[in-house]
Image: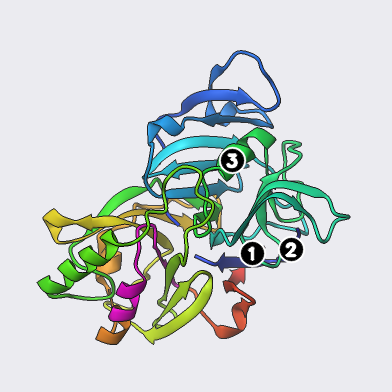
Amino acid sequence: MSRDVGRRTVIAGLGAASITGGAGLLIPSGASGQALIKEIHALKPGEFTWHPERSPDGPLAIVVAIPDQRVHVYRNGIRIGVSTCSTGKPGHATPTGVFTILEKDKNHHSSTYNNAPMPNMNRLTWSGIALHAGNLPGYPASHGCIRLPPKFSALLFGLTHVGTPVILAGSHSDPQEVVHPGLVLGDYAAHEFERVKVGLKGKTNPWPAQVTRYDAPASILISSADSKGVLLVDGKVVGEAPVTIRDPSRPLGSHVFMLVDTHDGRQGLSWQAISHNDKAGVPLGQPEVSVIERISASADARSRVHEAMHPGMTLVTTDLPAHPDTRSARDFVVMGEDVG
C-alpha cells in the first residue's frame, strides 16, 4: 500500500482517545525474555507495552504520534498499549488527520509493491494508507503506511473493528470525558432524550473482544469553514445539511468526540474527546462541551443523525472546508494547507 500525499494535510474518514502514567509492561518484539518496566519514551524499535486489563471494555481509539514514532491505543479513555512504529519517509509522508478503519485483512498482500506481505492490515484509506506489521528501523521508512511490530499488530488486530477511529497527528491532547446536556446538533425536548436513549440501547455494542466488524459505523463531520455537517455511514456520505455555529468568528478547533452512552443524570450524551493538530509541539487544551453546544441544525437533520447514532459513533469538528472534490471512492477527505 502506498500514497504520496505531498505537502497537504489530510483529514480522512472520521476518533477519540488516555495516558495513565509513563511506564508499562515492555514486551520486546520477537523476544521471549523477561518482561521489563521501562519509560515509554525509551522504547527501542520493535518494542511495545500492552495492558488490556486496564480497561476491559469501552470504545477503542488509536492515536499515531508521528513525530514520536509511537502508536497509542486507548479503550474507554484509558491507554492500554503503546508501540514503536515507522511512518512514511520523505516523499511518501503519512497524512495527518482523523480516519476510521475501512477494512481488515489478517493476511493482506500489497497490490503495489510486488505482492509484499502486510499482515494484520487495518485499512485507513482506499488509496493506500493502513496499519500493518512491518520492519521498524527506528525512523520513518514506509511508503505512507504505519508499520507495527508483528506481535503488537496481531494484538491490535484482535481488538479493532470497521469504524474504529484512528488519529494520525503531529500533536494531540490527553482525552477526557465530556457530557453534553443535550443531544446532537441542537436543543431538544425531554421526550427526545428518552427516544434516543431507547434507540441507543437497541444498537449493537461494538466493543466486545475479537470484534471484526461493526455494521454501519456512523461519523459526523462538522466544518466551520462551510457551515456544513456531513453524515457518513459505513464510510459513505449519506447526508449533508447546513449547520449554525454560534459565535462563528471563533474557531471550533480540531476535535474528535466518540459517543460512549447516554448520561441519565445530565439528560444528555457522554463522549470521550480528544484534540489534535497536524504540527508537532503545538500546545493543545482539552476539548470542551462548549464546542458541541455551539453547533445546531434543523429538526430534519437532527432526526437523521439520531437514527444513525450508536455507541462508538464519532463527531469530528474542523475549521477546514469539506469540499466535494476532496472525496474519492469511499474515502472522505478534507485537504488542508501545505505543511512544508
Q: Is residue 199 above or below residue 134?
A: below
Residue 71 placement: quadrant: top right
* Element type where label 3 sits in the image: strand
Q: Which residue is mark 2?
A: 3
Q: Is residue 84 visible?
A: no
Three-letter amino acid code of the residue under disc 2: Arg
Q: Which residue is mark 3?
A: 70
Give the CA distance from mark 1 to mark 2. 9 Å
Disc with the residue nearer the chain's start (1 vs 2) = 2
- Whether the residues at callouts 1 and 3 have beta carbons within 8 Å, the answer is no
Residue depicted at 34% across the width and 82% down the height: 243
Disc with the residue nearer the chain's start (3 vs 2) = 2
* Element type where label 2 sits in the image: loop
In the image, which is nearer the foreground, mark 1 or mark 2? 1
User: 193 and 324: which one is in front?
Assistant: 193
Q: Which residue is mark 1?
A: 125
- Whether the residues at callouts 1 and 2 have beta carbons within 8 Å, the answer is yes
Question: Percent from the top left, x then y, of residue 23?
Answer: 48, 25
* Element type where label 1 sits in the image: loop
Give the CA distance from mark 3 to mark 2. 20 Å
Give the CA distance from mark 1 to mark 3. 20 Å
Q: Is residue 256 visible?
A: yes
Residue depicted at 65% across the width and 14% down the height: 33
Q: Which residues are magenta?
A: 303-319
**Mark 3 crowdedness (10 Å alpha carbons): few <14, some 14-19, many ≥20:** many
